[in-house]
Each structure stands twice: as structure tokens, then as C-alpha cells.
Amino acid sequence: MFLHSNGSHTYRAMTLVEVTLVLATILGLVSVTFIGAASYKNGANRALCVHQVANVQKAMRCYCNFYELEPLEPVTDLKKRIIKDSKFFYVEPSCPSQGTYTYFKDTVPNVGELFIQCSIPDHGPKDTYSW
């Protein structure tokens, strides 16, 4: 509030245009934040899925090395032996983005072939030549 020399008061306030611009700026910042958070969540879900695939692959290789199983050797219930019967995992892994896992069937996969794969296309490791 300003006081003039003649004793009258003048109030300074924001105009409707200024208020609209401030609100538009705030809404723009909020929308950018939500888009960034969604992208971050998708990337984190993909990383977790790849991590789980790698852990299952390592567990399968450990199991096969321990029992001296060769690639393409037939093994009944290999998934059950690695995930349920062993102490590698407390629970069966699941994709955080609601993808489904499929397992290699009843044989030991070759080096470089994945024992477990996610149904979401980009939820796999980029390179598996030494797995």
C-alpha cells in the first residue's frame, strides 16, 4: 500500500494476466516433472528386470557348474531346481513392469543364450555373448 501526499491510498496488486502467466508457468513445471518421473520409473523398471535376468543366469551357471552339466545337456525341471529347490532365490523373480518371464526348456542353454527372458522387448541385456 502506498500513501500519497494528499492522503489517499493506492494498492498494488497483480493483474489477471500476471496471475494467469504465473499459473501457466507453474503448471508447465509440474508437467515436465511428471514426464521426467515417468521416464525415470520406466528406466528403473528396465534396469531391475535386466538385473533379475542376470541373477537368474548366474544362478543357472553356478548350478550347472556345481553339478557338472554341459550346454545342451537335458535336465528335467531345471527352472524348479534353480528357483524353488535351491537357496539362490527366496521367491521367483517377476518383472516390475508386469512383463512375463519365459524359461529355457529342459536343457542347459549354450553360453550366450539366456535361460530366462522377459516378454517386454527392451527388458533384456544388450549383450549376452559371455553369459
Image (cartoon, rainbow, N blue to C red):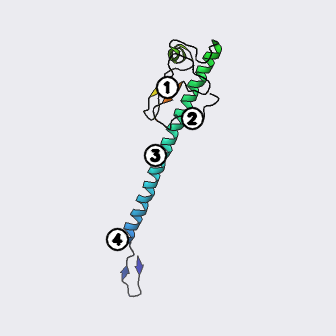
Q: Disc 2 and disc 3: Cα gap in Å?
A: 21 Å
Which label's residue is closer to the chain start, 2 or 3? 3
Residue type pointed to by label 3: Ala
Q: Answer with left or right where residue 34 lies relative to residue 55.
A: left
Q: Are marks 3 and 4 in contact (CB under 8 Å)?
A: no
The circle drawn on residue 16 is 4
Q: Are marks 1 and 2 in contact (CB under 8 Å)?
A: no
Q: Are marks 4 and 1 in contact (CB under 8 Å)?
A: no
Q: Disc 4 and disc 1: Cα gap in Å?
A: 55 Å
Q: Which residue is mark 3?
A: 38
Query: Between tags 4 and 1, which lies in front?
Result: 1
Q: Disc 1 and disc 2: Cα gap in Å?
A: 16 Å
Q: 52 or 8: nearer the eye?
A: 52
Question: In the image, residue 110 lies at what x, y percent?
Answer: 60, 22
Q: Which residue is mark 2?
A: 125
Residue type pointed to by label 2: Pro
Q: Looking at the image, is 16 positioned above or below residue 4?
A: above
Q: Which residue is mark 1?
A: 93
Q: SS of the residue at dot 4?
A: helix
Q: Residues within 10 Å of mark 3 (few under 14, many from 20)?
A: few
Q: Disc 3 and disc 1: Cα gap in Å?
A: 23 Å
Q: SS of the residue at dot 1?
A: loop
Q: Looking at the image, is 11 positioned above or below residue 27?
A: below
The circle drawn on residue 39 is none
Question: In the image, residue 79 lies at what x, y percent?
Answer: 51, 18
Residue under the point 38% across and 88% down? 6
Residue under the point 51% across and 35% down? 123
